[in-house]
Image: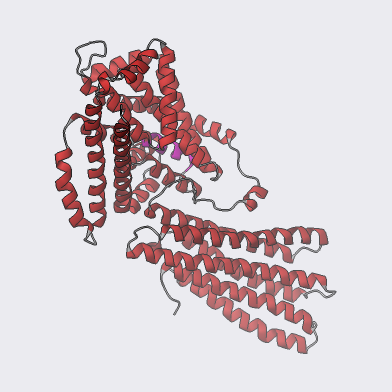
Amino acid sequence: MSILSIFKLVGCLAMLMYGMKIMSDSLQKMAGSQLRHVLGTMTRNRVTGLLTGAFVTASVQSSTATTVMTVSFVNAGLLTLAQAISVIMGANIGTTCTAWIMSAGFAFNITDMVWPALFIAIILSYTKTKKSLGEFLFGLSFMFLGLGTLKANAVDMDLGHNEAVLSFFESTGNWGYGTYLLFLLIGGILTMCVQSSAAVMAITMILCSSGALGIYPGIALVMGENIGTTVTSNLAALSANPQARRAALAHMLFNVFGVCWILIIFTHFIDAVCMMVGYDPHSTSANPAILSVVLAAFHTSFNVCNVLILIWFIKPIEKLVCKIIPNKTEADEEDSRLQFISAGLMQTPELSVYEAQKEIASFGLRVQKMFSLVKELIGIKDEKEFVKLYSRIEKYENITDDLEIEIANYLDQVSDAHLSDETKAKIRAMLRQIAELESIGDSCFNLARTMNRKNAGKEDFTDKQYERISMMFDLANDALTQMNTIFAGRRDTLDANRSFNIEIEINNYRNQLRSQNIKDVNNHEYSYAVGTMYIDLINECEKLGDYVVNVIEARLGVKQK
């Protein structure tokens, strides 16, 4: 085997992986929002969740994309972890479509169809409405071109008669189950190294269809690929939140369990699959070209059977992963940063924008939590408790600063991709949202600092002042609650008028309290210094209300009249 042949093999694999990525990305662009809607509404029980996971994964040709969307819905409260596990099980079935597509590429000479498809793809890519379809055809063409050249290169390399390859496989062929375990390990390691189960499946199909590798060790490679791809997702989820890690762990447990029971009936199960496709694994005259079909059939049979066994044990799996990965403590929650954006997961702009929007919604909940701590601060008289709570608010202020920068950097990376005008407008609106949310965090901290300044003095607010401050805080909290309601809903079903009305109430009440404050100071009900701090709190709440309106305008694309 020459160095040139190795480079050809690697290049073909790269073309295959690139084609798969382009195809998956374009499918997600064409159907991303609809698929998210399906995923959020069609998972009422384990069966519909299973079918939904299979449908979505088959549609976008990416189990990773399905897992990312599923985890997002779990964290948003739209799906339970049990429902997410059923979707992930379905994703394992949906991803077997890739093996059948590759099997078709090996079974038939489809390279000639690539050139007209590329020509059509170029034409469509220059249109605005069909650009994603053109990208899909590009990806599909590159994938089939990679498969075709991979197959031709394998024929030129004559792997079935290559002494080095044959001697390696022969040296490991007499170890019984040890052989299967060895190839299972090799398959897992290869998948982790190349970060693509499709590439390992293609390599396995080459080796088997050329006659260099038998069907039993070849299927062991496929089983190793099933475990290797879950190790990759678990490593990617290490920096994510508990629910993301639980979903990834459930995926790994699902596949590991499947591999374990398959190993017990290994040869019998494979013989049954071979019989199903009309191939005799023990015949010396059998055509090895059909082995790509056998591998695809095994991949589907393995995942379907595994699902039929484990779908009845979703609740125990949920309890197990929750026990292994416990919830965060309150301190951990305040120390954490991004909740939804995971740097280790590769996503398309469609999914990336969606994840960023979820992160912004989480940002909104955090600033409201920060405001609730400020409300608690007002009623605290004990010095130690006051200092402890004030420190927590200060920590939240630092978190809001960091969140703004991290989300902005992420959106900046997303904007480097080829985006539609609509997506670019979404990103601009998101950048405005996070800037205004950070300003809300600043307002909360300013309120806390004013309270701290008041505590450092000898004078206190009167009961009437505390009552009026509490009413103003309630109005500001209503504004924040309505803001988070809008974040949680769909843009086309929401109305900004409720938020605008709250802002008008805040402004009117602020004006009323300003006038009343001047009268109270003149009547010597409290000192000018106390009145200044009191009106500072009122003005800061009014500023906070303005920032909330700015967030809602950016979110819904409307202007307050």
For the image shown, how many numbered marks are present on the structure?
0
Q: Name the outermost residue toward the right.
A: 458
- Counting from the top left corner in percent of width and height, residue 21 is at 33, 45
The one of 541 and 350 positioned closer to us in this rendering: 350
Quadrant assignment for the N terminus? top left
Residue located at (78% from left, 61% from top): 387
- Counting from the top left corner in percent of width and height, residue 162 is at 28, 20
Location of residue 322 with respect to 329 vertically, above or below: above
Location of residue 366 with respect to 9 vertically, above or below: below
When asked about the image quadrant of residue 510, the answer is bottom right
Residue located at (18% from left, 56% from top): 123
Location of residue 454 with respect to 66 vertically, above or below: below
Principal SS element in the magenta part?
A: helix
When asked about the image quadrant of residue 440, the answer is bottom right
Residue located at (73% from left, 64% from top): 377
Residue located at (44% from left, 31% from top): 228
Residue 327 is left or right of residue 27, and the answer is: right
Quadrant assignment for the C terminus? bottom left
Location of residue 334 with respect to 96 vertically, above or below: below
- Counting from the top left corner in percent of width and height, residue 313 is at 46, 28
- Counting from the top left corner in percent of width and height, residue 64 is at 40, 41
Magenta segment: 80-91
In magenta segment, residue 293: no
Residue 269 is left or right of residue 129, and the answer is: right
Residue 424 is left or right of residue 273, and the answer is: right
